[in-house]
Each structure stands twice: as C-alpha cells, then as structure tokens.
Amino acid sequence: MAMGFKHFNFFALMLVGLGLIVAVHAQDQSGFISIACGVPANSSFTDDTTGINYISDATFIDSGVSKSVSTDIKATDQQQVWNVRSFPQGNRNCYTINVTGGTKYLIRATFMHGNYDGKGNLPQFDLYLGPNKWDTVKVLNSSISVIKELIDVPSWNYIHVCLVNTGLGTPFISAIELRPLKNTTYITKAGSLALFLRVDVGSKTSPAYRYPYDVYDRLWMPLDSSLLNWTDIRTSLTVDSKIHNDYHPPSIVMSTAATPIDDGPMEFNWNSEDAATAEYYIYIHFAEIVKLQGNQSRSFNITLNGKYWYGPLVPDYLSTISLYSPSALAGQAKYDFSIFKTENSTLPPIMNAVEIYSVKYLLQSETDQGDVDAIAKIKSTYGIKRIWQGDPCAPKGYSWEGLNCSYDGDTPPRITSLNLSSSGLVGNISADISNLVMLQYLDLSNNSLTGSVPDFLSQLQNLRVLNLERNQLSGSIPIQLNERSKNGSLSLSVGDNPNLCGSDSCNKKKSNVVVPIVASLGGLLILAFIVAAIFLGIRIKRREQHVIMVDNESNFQNPSLESIQRQFTYSELLKMTNNFERILGKGGFGTVYRGNIDDTQVAVKMLSPSSVQGFQQFQSEVKLLMRVHHRNLTTLVGYCYEGTNMGLIYEYMANGDLEEHLSGERANILNWEDRLRIATDAAQGLEYLHHGCKPPIVHRDVKCTNILLNENFHAKLADFGLSKIFPTDGGTHVSTVVAGTPGYLDPEYYISNWLTEKSDVYSFGVVLLEIITSRPAIERSQERTHVSQWVSSMLAQGDIKNIVDPRLRGNFNINSAWKACEIAMACVSPTSTKRPTMSQAVAELKECLETELARTKKGLEGDSTNSIEMLNMNLTTELRPLAR
C-alpha cells in the first residue's frame, strides 16, 4: 500500500517520534479510559510526558500473562508501553471495557514488543472489536510501536477488544486508550473510521504531539515539508484562542503550515488499498498564520482527480477551518488532490494538517443481548474457569467453548446449545438458564449440582435434550418435563442422582406431590376469582360513573365495545378468530389475531406458553386497562382465562402500528399533519396516565410498535404489560428492575433503577424523533447510531430539511418542524430534570399542529419559509464540499 504527498511514502514519517512526546502539564481527562496492559493489579501511574493517568488492565480481563519489555525500551518510551500482556493460551482473548453507549470514541490499541519474551520472536495476529475484525497486527520491529486507531460509536455500555491467535505467533498488547469525541465530528453515512494517515504539516521537530496539546489525544505525526518541495511557515501566536471548531486540531499543530516553493499547486495523493471496495474520508485543516498586508490575499481552489472539489477557500487569520468530505471517497485506484491559488490571489495556497481515514464496516451482529446477559450471569454464578470472553457466539469461528448458536442473516445470533458437563458446578441449577429461551440442548451432567429440578426448565419450549446425570439433585422431576419425555418431545437423562425420582416412582413422597398440585389448582381458582372480581367491580364502578377520566368527552370510538366487555371461553376465541386463522402481529407476550364479535372487528392477543414473564404481564395489563379509560388508550373488549389459555381482546385498529408506516412497510406515506396529530394523540395518552390517573401510571414501554392507528389514523397507546402504578405516598420515583426496549430506554433509569414519569418522556422523545425522521431508534447498520445522535449532528449544522423524512419532499412548515425537533430533543435529554412533562409536550405539539394546519388551510404546497437557507452554522468553523 503506497500513500504520500508527491508519491512520498509516509510509513517512515509515521514511525518517527512515536516515543518522543513533548512534556507538558496535565489537563482535564474527563471521559478518558487509559489502560496500561500487564502492570500489576490495583496499580496506577501518571505518565511523566503527557500527564495521562493510567490504570492496570487486571480488572478488564481474566486471562493472559504479564511481561516486562527490555531496559533500553524503558529508557526511551512512555511508561504505558513498559509492560505487555501476552496470550499464549486460547485462540481468542478479550478485554471487556465499560463505556457510555451511543458516545463516539477514538479507540486506540498500542503494541510495543520490546523483546518481552527474550527471544525476539515477532508475531502477527488479528485485532477484533467485538465480533468484527478491526485489523491485522504485524510486528516488524521489536523497538517500534504498532498503533491501531478506530473511531466508533458503541451500541451498548461496553466494548470487547479481542486478540485472535492466527498461528503466526503469540498475541500481546501494551495499552488500550479510549477518548470520547463530539458526535458532530467524523460523521459517516455508514461504517466506522480506521486511521489511515494523520500529519502535522510543516513541523520540522521530531515529537509527535498528542494530549494535552490535543484535547482528544490524537497523535499528530510530523511532516517535514522540505522533503516535498514545500516550504514551512509558522507563527508563535495561538491559533483558535477562542475555540469554535468541534474538531479541535491543536494550536501547536495549526501554528505550522506549508506552502509551495515555486508558487505552483500543492499536490498530494495516496493509492487505494482496494479500488473496488476501499472507501475513505479526508479532513483538511486550514488556518492563516501570516498577518497579510493590505495588498496581499490568499485564496485557493481544490480538485480531486482533476475535478473541482471545493473553493475558493480563504483561510481566516489564526482561526481553523476544517474541510471534510461529506460522503466517502470510493471507486478510485488513486486519489490525487491539488490545491492551487485563484487568479486574484497574490499568495500561494497553504495547508496546516491532514487526516485520512478508511471505512471499516463492522457488519457481524452481536449475540442477542438477553442471551449475553444470561450467559454472563451463569458464568459468574458458577465461577466458570473457561476462557469465556468477548461475544459468546460471534464471530462463528470463535464462539465460547460449550456453546452452539443459531446464525440467521442479519439477526443477532442466539444460544441454542449449552454444554457444561464436568465443569465443577456446585449449588442449585441457575434460574438464569431460563432466559436462554432458544435453548435446544442443555447438558449439566457430571457436576455437583444440588436442590430440586426447577420448573422453569419446563418453560424452555425449544428444549429437545436435557442431561442432568451424575449430580446430587433431589426431589421429584416436574410433571411437565416427565410428560414431554414420555411423548418424545424431550430426551431427558437424570440417572445417578440418588435422591431424585421420577413422578411415577415417588411412592413414598406421593402425598408431598399432591399438596403442591392441589395448592396450584387452588391458587389458579383464587386467581381466576380475583380477576373476575376485578372485572365485576370495575363494571359496577362504571355504572356509578366512578371511572377515572381526564375530561368529560366520550372516549369510546365504538360504544358497543363497552357493552360487550366480558370474559370469553377458549372455544369462543376459536370461533371469533376462525381457529386463529389470521395473524396481525407477534410480540414477546404472544401472537395477535384478527377476530369478529358479531359484526365488530377485534384483535385477540394470546399469551404464548414460552413467554416466561407473560402471565405477570397478562395480569398487569388486565388490571390497568380495567381502571383507565381514555380516547388515546386502546380499549379492552374482554379476556379469556381458561387453564393455560389466556388472551386479551381489544378493539381492532385498522391501520396497524406506527412503525409499519414509518419504516415503509405500508404504501401510504404519512404527511406532516398526520405525523403531528399522531404524536399529539400519543402524548395525550401518556399525559392521562401521568396526570389524569390517581395514583399515576408509568407505561415503561413507549415505542412505535406500541402506538396503534385506527381507520382515521388517530393514535392510541397499547401494550401495558410493563406498566407501573406509582405509590400515593408522595415519592418521586419507584425503584424497580429495568424493563423496556433498547433504544427507547431512559439512560437515567437504566443506570439507577429509579423509574419516574420522565422515563416515559424520554421514550416518547425517541418516538417523536422517529416520527419526524422515519429513521429507526437505533440504526440497523454496523454503526448502530441512535436517532437522537444523528438528529443532534444534523441540528448542529442547522440542517432541518434533511432531518425531516425526505419522502415528504419539503412539504411541511419549517417553523413547525423546528419546534417538533426542539420538543423531541428536550424529551431525550440525558438528565431527567431537563425534560418537559407530558403536559408541556402536549401543549407544544398542539402549537406545532396548529402552525401546520394554518399552512394547509391556505392551500399552499409549502410555506414561504421553506425557501430559507437553513445552513445555520458558523462557516468559519467547518466547511464541506458542495455539489456543483
């Protein structure tokens, strides 16, 4: 791979000065994660040259061997590379590092061999970020660091940095560093960014500048311009004394520049790694560092491969302009840039710094998060000593020992087989196994497990093989497991458990078996009685007009539904759905079918037997829907509670859920008025739950699939299985286990377990952003960007037109769009106290809707404000090439 200015090879330049960093005093390191690998556990130090605080890697990994580099390396290099952690055991070893999900990070891995093994063996191995290959590490010189940098936005609150042994030597690592970046910088249409080149143009000194000169701790390699037929210019003054550029190239870097000796163009180029697939982003930083006289001017244009790219550009005095490519450069074998002065310019062009990144597509999905959490808890519970690190299933070739997984295209892998035979397990069978809902094969044989065989194993509907042989289990086998074993749907092995007996052979404990069965039946009868009493009591209250309402309006779209609200038998459900013929949708609770009661269409939601928590959600939804009543909440028609057959019957919503319309699954494209009306309807439903109900109710799962649309596109909130009723003791929050959907989950609630009404506000804010943009809460690409991050980056550029769904083609009122975005971004504030209440959100949305209605009433295709240029940014801060 060749790259350079004037065909000059930059590898040598990038290697010079890596170990020589100018010493300065430390500054703020907020958000920095600095890990020195191989240093003793619980130790830390501050590097003398940079002032960066480093900690040991011992808490981030549970494998590997600590080693020390040679003495001559310690004499010349920074302290964080004085030790390494090598991995002679295992094919894949991974660090688990907690981060802030959704934050853009510069991730740097450093490898300084330093002859740590005393043999001088120089290895080659692969570096992975999670389940995706980041790069190959090839060590060519034991005294020169290999550095890999990647700019990425983690989807979760952790990352895995993994070293993979490819048979070409023992992997090792010296340091891992993460630096948070502004989400408005280094934006790509897709993919992460791997460092290709970063140079400090015009620098003649050997040090590589980094933190604290650079607030993001980027490494700026010196480039001596005399080697390229350029001449250096410099200033002793500060560049950007008032920071206004989000990229923040350091003043010391921007204070040097280069200009051509012969007054000709400045040319630089690089060869593509692969003309067919490689993509690049370039960032060029300019600042005028010469105080121009009245008769002097500097103005220049830029071409790429002979075609106009940007210009004319006039750099500002002592102020940085960052010019970048808004989309990836692709499809070329070579990229030739030429910077040349305009006809009216008296001075040649100038350039201060350049960054080039190649695009990395991290396409492999991580294992389903529920499975990840479950297997991590199982590992912790039993103290499993295997090298279980990184993603459990992905990539496929490096899945954890004892696991098999399913791989289905772009969907996350699922754990289907768990073999913990002869693993030294003690104690009870962990309840976390019940969360591996796709499990087909479970082998816990040859261990020292005690206690009873738990009932939750019966709830694993996909389980086909269960081996519990040679343990110390006691009691009887659950009836359902025995039944599945007898009918051939489950291969059950329980031999050599002296105190365990099957249900057919437990004569001496038969009476003990009868008691729980009778108790269970009694409990079901009592529960059925309670549910019936709830329904009866609520109906009586309705007759007495004691139902909680937010206003005096009639909240029923179809009054006949109220009159038929009752308990149905399972046979009646079969009849009304024509044997469950037509499916409307599926969810975690179960499947929803279309049905008819006389001439009235209904939706029938049946509890799936495999839904572990479905019964609790069934109870919650029944209780809540019987006490609330509002035009923007789905109406409960009736219910079925007959043995294991449980279902809820709702009013039918002809236009399905909101996500179908935003994702393009339906031919109809919602116009701006419809979107604002739907948002207002959903907000009013939440406002009623928060402020119209006594005590208040928090929905806990507000998302587009839980907002249903009737035949007139009026919206109603649905799915109250996770809802929580607040106590009436005046408390501001409820402490509860986190529940909800990734992407919509309030970050404060996730961290603290404190649920408040503002948790719903955050989720609604995400929904509102989806309504505005028609983008999903979390991108389905490898970057997994959250919609709030994307909107934030667009708002920073004042780009409201490109935020709103492009399918609307600008047919909306600009002021209405701005206000809707402001409401949404306020709702998704990371701090709950900065979020509005739902009442405030409703009032603001109604104003948005009124503004749009006024436009459509005038019969205008677009408001005159639509023609206003919305590039509301400081053009001296960041520029990007515009199409011509």
Image: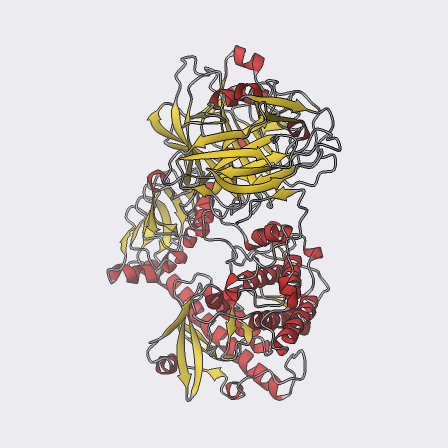
Q: Residue at x 43, y 37 (%)?
A: 389
Measuring 56% from the left and 17% from the top, which residue is drawn there? 77
Point out the image quarter for the N terminus: top left
Q: Is residue 865 visible?
A: yes
Q: Nearer the viewer, residue 663 or 647?
A: 663
Q: Residue 128: x and y, percent?
A: 43, 36
The x and y percentages for residue 119 are 40, 13
Above/below status of 1 relative to 152:
above
The residue lying toward the viewer, choosing from 790 and 285, is 285
Task: Give coordinates of residue 705: x percent, y percent.
Answer: 49, 66
Toward which corner of the image does residue 290 lie, by quadrant? top right
State left or right for residue 382 relative to residue 773.
left
Q: Residue at x 53, y 64 (%)?
A: 809
Of residues 174 and 560, the one nearer the viewer is: 174
Looking at the image, which residue sits at the far top?
72
Drawn side of residue 298 relative to residue 526, left or right: right
Quarter of the image where one finds residue 295: top right
Number of marks: 0
Answer yes or no: is residue 224 visible: no
| Residue 117 to residue 685: above or below | above
